[in-house]
Amino acid sequence: MPDMNLGITDRLRPILEDVKTMVRDEILPLDDAYLEEVGKGDRWTYTPRQTEILEGLKTEARKRGLWNFWLTDSDRGYGLSTVEYAYLAEEMGKAHLGAEVFNCSAPDTGNMEVLERYSTDAQKKRWLEPLLEGEIRSAYLMTEPDVASSDATNVAMSCVRDGNEYVLNGEKWWSSGAGDPRCAIYIVMVRTGDDDAPKHQRHSMILVPADTAGVEKVRAMEVYGHDDAPHGHLHLRFTNVRVPVENLIVGEGKGFEIAQGRLGPGRIHHCMRAIGQAERALELMCTRALRREAFGKPLAQLGANYDIIAECRMDIEMARLLCLKAAWMMDQGDARAAAPWISQIKVIAPQVALRVTDEAVQMHGGQGVSQDTPLARSWTGLRTLRLADGPDAVHRRQVARNELRKYTQERV
Ligand SMILES: Cc1cc2nc3c(=O)[nH]c(=O)nc-3n(C[C@H](O)[C@H](O)[C@H](O)COP(=O)(O)OP(=O)(O)OC[C@H]3O[C@@H](n4cnc5c(N)ncnc54)[C@H](O)[C@@H]3O)c2cc1C
């Protein structure tokens, strides 16, 4: 293995400073104004004020060259390493709009990775280019209501070839971002092979434009009572949805091969931002603990609050180092070797960020669960991150299997 450098490189330093400054001085101050607009009129459109805030910030970021950092190891954009990107994504995680302003938000980064690595020139031109420009958005449709989707071999949406078209039937849910009026393209995991095909060669990925006939928006799923409009997590029904055969990505049976490429970066990006959310929660906790008094003392000096603050700091530092190591493993170019490291951080980062955020909520008393701080919203997002992109148990399984493999030649 080459030397492991997890530090901030010279080329990253000025970019990181610019991103930090923009998040702190320009994006965070507008987060509340943006969120207050949700639900004014139709929940599933953007109000003129929301568009003005979001597009204004995006234009500013682009003008300063702060755009598409997630394109690691690529000729397009900066060509940063995953380790370098981790520092930037952490900063973006501190603001609700942070990732989107720099065109680095989920699920688009994972989807753009798929298009960048696996799609044809025509597919790139039609879908990747507008995504890279921040003109449209996308969704990734794997999870289904009727099957345990943490085991993706269960995915059942049928996709049958009929002449020059594929015909899709079935249901998907938790399709994040599909509520957004700008969401123009879905990458859909479907079943193309029968039971005779090897388990990991029965599935494919196919591009379905959101406005294709037969795609029905059944409802918006709620996360602890919140629908996350206008982004949304939709339940969709496909009835005889027809797309040209050219919309298939790579070929029939290649779904798992592509999923491996997609889910690695997508997952670690979530973890990087979760660490940013934890940092912000700790900052809010400390500020509040010093300013507010009870029983004649600042909250910080009461009960076990010193210990709580110290534990949060230590947990964040451990999570960040693990995240950087996983990022470094990805940078070595061996996806198989990096996978258990991504699984480790996918378990740790949401749990740590959730714990820190929960303590920050507690230190804020009633205000902590209200709309007056970003903590409650952040908590619900982090709680779902223990399920989304694979539940904790599935990632632990991956880590344990990798560990046990060291002691046996057989697959466990
Ligand atoms: C807010 C949110 C956004 C999401 N966004 C998307 C999206 O954009 N696209 C998409 O396709 N999906 C999305 N999902 C879905 C998410 O990825 C799935 O919910 C997740 O993969 C689990 O699948 P499932 O819900 O079918 O749970 P199941 O597969 O039914 O699993 C339920 C539980 O079973 C247990 N379990 C499963 N396997 C094991 C094991 N090996 N060992 C021990 N216990 C186990 C775990 O406790 C697990 O949580 C999103 C989910 C949420 C909540």
Image (cartoon, helix red, strand yellow):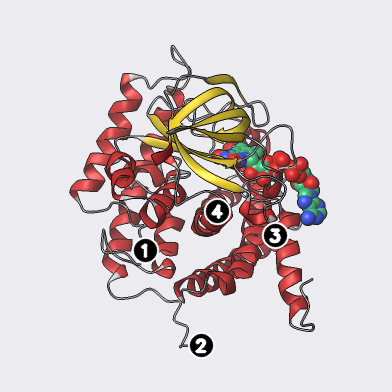
Q: Position of residue 305 (x, y in %)?
A: 70, 56
Work out how far the residue at label 3 is from the one at label 4, CA to CA, in angstroms: 15 Å
- Residue at mark 2: 1
Amino acid residing under circle 1? Thr
How crowded pointer 2 is (Cα within 10 Å; few <14, some 14-19, many 20+) is rated as: few
How crowded pointer 1 is (Cα within 10 Å; few <14, some 14-19, many 20+) is rated as: many
Q: Nearer the viewer, mark 3 or mark 4?
A: 4
Tell me if residue 91 comes above or below residue 57 in the rendering: below
- Residue at mark 4: 259
Tell me if residue 1 comes above or below residue 396 in the rendering: below
Find residue 395 and name its label: 3
Work out how far the residue at label 2 is from the one at label 4, CA to CA, in angstroms: 26 Å
Work out how far the residue at label 2 is from the one at label 1, CA to CA, in angstroms: 20 Å
User: Earlier along the polypeptide chain: callout 2 or callout 4?
Assistant: 2
Question: Which residue is painted at 33% across and 62% down in the image?
Answer: 16
- Residue at mark 1: 72
Tell me if residue 227 comes above or below residue 246 in the rendering: above
Amino acid residing under circle 3? His
Residue 392 left/right relative to 186: right
In this view, the residue farthest toward the front is 163
How crowded pointer 4 is (Cα within 10 Å; few <14, some 14-19, many 20+) is rated as: some
The answer to whether the beta carbon of the residue marked 1 is less than 8 Å from any atom of ligand 1 is no
